[in-house]
Image (tube, coloured by chain):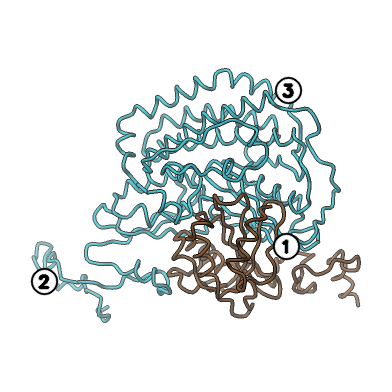
Chain colours: A cyan, B brown
């Protein structure tokens, strides 16, 4: 086949007499700018810019694979040598259409649909939804139920951060820390399993409260763990914080300032690592958080290391909150009395909670039937992943994985 | 409910507002025309007495008769979430100006609304499908997109307009469908 297109170099049209050491074969031709063939013709400004490959650049398809727990992710990378010039994340490999499924399920059933979104911190997917429904229905949640929500939520936050810490090291090639953080996480998973009946997809929150009261097994496990939690956390910190390789690979990588982070719609620990104390538990208080005493840790550096260290600070604050919850837990019912068939009056409600990765929000519209008319799920990982194109270009290919790990996206939530 | 915010919004955006400023629980809601989106959001973001710096969400909505875009904003000047709804986009050709000049992060949120509803955001430089395959033709979250195993929302039930008055006669759409099929 002969080269007919103007951009085609005809590199394989080697004359029959040419040997492999013929200088003409290995000679670099001047090619300038030519168009690489994208999977589909470029339809947007950004796509045509991305698929225009200059001299020395190479398009590499990374994935779709499963990088540790993050989920099925695919990124098309434009690299020059080992430097990332540009990248284009391709989503949808975990898309299940949860919003559509929820619009065709009744209000109680949607909670089950929301659970597997962020399988690492499921309670924070249920929480904004039940809060939004409670606003639609004008339901007051019993105080004991609110305390149980906060208690289980903070446990889930710790387990999620423990996992993020371990997998941060795993993404960098360190295999040991994940084993230690799984010891911690397994404790909390067992605790939450005793409380909710499930290890990961809890399905615990109900409209107007929670599914069950605290039980003996949960309390005894929690008491055991709380007595040694602080020491355990300190011990795990020593694994990585004093590891020079880990620190040097993370420091000064993926730096972002708070102004840019706000423009990129960041929330959660990633935003607070830039120095901005934006935490929805304080910025827009919900549940019983106004009654609890805790700090909002921030860091100024805004790099990968700051994002990692901030999660450790948050674990310590969560331990404080759990301690206070156990001391202030009031008696009373854990579920408001509601009819089984819920038909909220037509209206709209928005509720947001501070999850381990940022703002989890639900926007619910009711049209008077027993099914939500529209259920919009907002996930923070989606926006953190969107800023890859801002953070990664200019860094080395291996640093992409470090930045990815420090942002801690969960693809189940990204893809909905 | 933040009453002073309501007065501030009314005095600032008086003639641009479609309908009254609504307040319920910890939420304030204003409705504007799609053409006013860049000016109103720029004012909300930039003006020192409003300072809505955090874009909490961008959502598309298909009400069955028109399309809407819903922006949720947070500011340290108020205790409410502010909801800005761009109303009255025609279902055949929904178009709204992009707000990526204010929040770069809205690029993907708008891509998602485009993917799910077919709403075109003018000025978004990367408006392509994000979850569905690039050669996919439909818009899954539109109300005329029915799930194959969905009895209560089957094509016989028709497009369900938002906030239709509720009465016992249309209490169970499934029953309505069965009756219409029988008749």
Q: Residue at x 70, y 75 (%)?
A: B65
Mark 3 or 1: the one toward you: 1
Q: Residue at x 59, y 68 (%)?
A: B13
**Left or right: residue A224 compared with residue A9:** right
Query: Which residue is identified by label 1?
Result: A373
Q: Secondary structure at mark 1?
A: loop
Q: Secondary structure at mark 2?
A: loop
Q: Position of residue A262 (x, y in %)?
A: 46, 53
Q: Residues within 10 Å of mark 3 (few under 14, many from 20)?
A: few
Vertical side of A293 occupied by A226: above or below: above
Mark 1 or 2: the one toward you: 1
The numbered mark, 1 or 2, whose residue comes first in the sequence reads 2
The numbered mark, 3 or 1, whose residue comes first in the sequence reads 3
Q: Residue at x 56, y 55 (%)?
A: B56
State yes or no: discs 1 and 2 in contact (Cβ < 8 Å): no
Vertical side of A65 occupied by A54: above or below: below
Mark 2 or 3: the one toward you: 3
Q: Position of residue A360 (x, y in %)?
A: 59, 48
Which label number is shown at residue A160? none
Query: Which residue is identified by label 3?
Result: A216
Give the chain of mark 3: A
Q: Same chain for the residues at labels 1 and 2, yes or no?
A: yes
Mark 1–mark 2 Cα distance, whole angstroms, equals 72 Å
Q: Same chain for the residues at labels 3 and 1, yes or no?
A: yes
Query: Which residue is identified by label 2?
Result: A17
The numbered mark, 2 or 3, whose residue comes first in the sequence reads 2
Q: Position of residue A73 (x, y in %)?
A: 46, 53
State yes or no: discs 2 and 3 in contact (Cβ < 8 Å): no
Give the chain of mark 1: A
**Left or right: residue A46 compared with residue A122:** left
Q: Residues within 10 Å of mark 1 (few under 14, many from 20)?
A: many
Q: Secondary structure at mark 3?
A: helix
């Amino acid at each position: 086949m002969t080269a007919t297109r103007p951009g085609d170099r005809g590199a394989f049209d080697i004359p029959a007499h040419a040997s492999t050491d013929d200088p003409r074969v290995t000679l670099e031709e001047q090619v300038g700018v030519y168009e690489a063939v994208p999977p589909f013709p470029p339809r947007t400004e950004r796509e045509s810019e991305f698929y225009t490959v200059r001299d020395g650049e190479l398009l590499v398809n990374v994935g779709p694979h499963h990088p540790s727990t993050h989920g099925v992710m695919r990124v098309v990378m434009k690299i020059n040598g080992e430097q990332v010039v540009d990248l284009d994340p391709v989503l949808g490999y975990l898309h299940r259409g949860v919003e559509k499924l929820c619009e065709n399920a009744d209000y109680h059933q949607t909670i089950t649909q929301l659970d597997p979104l962020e399988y690492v911190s499921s309670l924070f997917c249920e929480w904004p939804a039940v809060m939004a429904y409670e606003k639609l229905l004008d339901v007051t949640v019993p105080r004991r139920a609110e305390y149980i929500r906060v208690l289980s939520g903070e446990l889930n936050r710790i387990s999620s951060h423990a996992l993020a810490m371990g997998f941060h090291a795993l993404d960098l090639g360190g295999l040991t820390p994940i084993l230690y953080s799984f010891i911690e996480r397994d404790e909390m998973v067992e605790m939450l399993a005793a409380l909710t009946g499930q290890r990961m997809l809890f399905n615990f929150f109900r409209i107007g409260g929670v599914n069950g009261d605290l039980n003996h097994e949960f309390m005894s496990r929690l008491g055991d763990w709380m007595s040694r939690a602080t020491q355990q956390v300190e011990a795990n910190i020593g694994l990585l914080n004093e590891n020079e390789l880990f620190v040097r690979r993370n420091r000064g990588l993926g730096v972002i300032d708070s102004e840019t982070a706000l423009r990129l719609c960041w929330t959660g620990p990633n935003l607070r690592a830039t120095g901005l104390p934006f935490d929805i538990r304080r910025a827009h208080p919900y549940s019983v958080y106004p009654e609890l005493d805790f700090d909002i840790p921030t860091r100024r550096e805004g790099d990968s290391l700051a994002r990692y260290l901030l999660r450790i600070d948050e674990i310590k604050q969560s331990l404080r909150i759990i301690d206070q919850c156990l001391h202030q837990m009031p008696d009373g019912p854990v579920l408001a009395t509601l009819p089984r068939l819920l038909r909220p009056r037509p209206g709209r409600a928005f509720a947001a909670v501070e999850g381990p990765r940022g703002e989890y929000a639900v926007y619910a519209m009711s049209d008077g039937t027993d099914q939500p008319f529209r259920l919009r799920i907002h996930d923070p990982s989606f926006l953190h992943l969107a800023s890859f194109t801002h953070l990664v270009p200019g860094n080395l290919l291996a640093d992409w994985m470090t930045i990815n790990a420090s942002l801690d996206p969960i693809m189940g939530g990204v893809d909905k | 409910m933040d009453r002073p915010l309501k007065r501030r919004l009314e005095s600032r955006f008086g003639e641009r507002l479609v309908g009254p400023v609504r307040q319920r629980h910890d939420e304030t809601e204003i409705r504007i025309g799609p053409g006013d989106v860049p000016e109103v959001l720029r004012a909300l973001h930039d003006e020192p007495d409003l300072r809505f710096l955090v874009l909490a969400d961008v959502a598309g909505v298909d009400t069955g008769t028109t399309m809407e875009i819903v922006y949720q904003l947070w500011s340290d000047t108020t205790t409410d979430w502010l909801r800005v709804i761009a109303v009255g986009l025609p279902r055949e050709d929904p178009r709204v100006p992009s707000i990526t000049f204010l929040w770069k992060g809205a690029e993907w949120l708008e891509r998602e609304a485009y993917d799910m509803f077919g709403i075109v955001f003018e000025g978004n430089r990367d408006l392509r499908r994000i979850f569905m395959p690039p050669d996919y033709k439909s818009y899954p979250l539109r109300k005329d997109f029915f799930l194959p195993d969905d009895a209560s929302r089957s094509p016989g039930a028709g497009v369900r307009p938002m906030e239709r008055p509720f009465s016992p006669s249309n209490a169970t759409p499934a029953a309505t469908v069965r009756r219409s099929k029988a008749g």
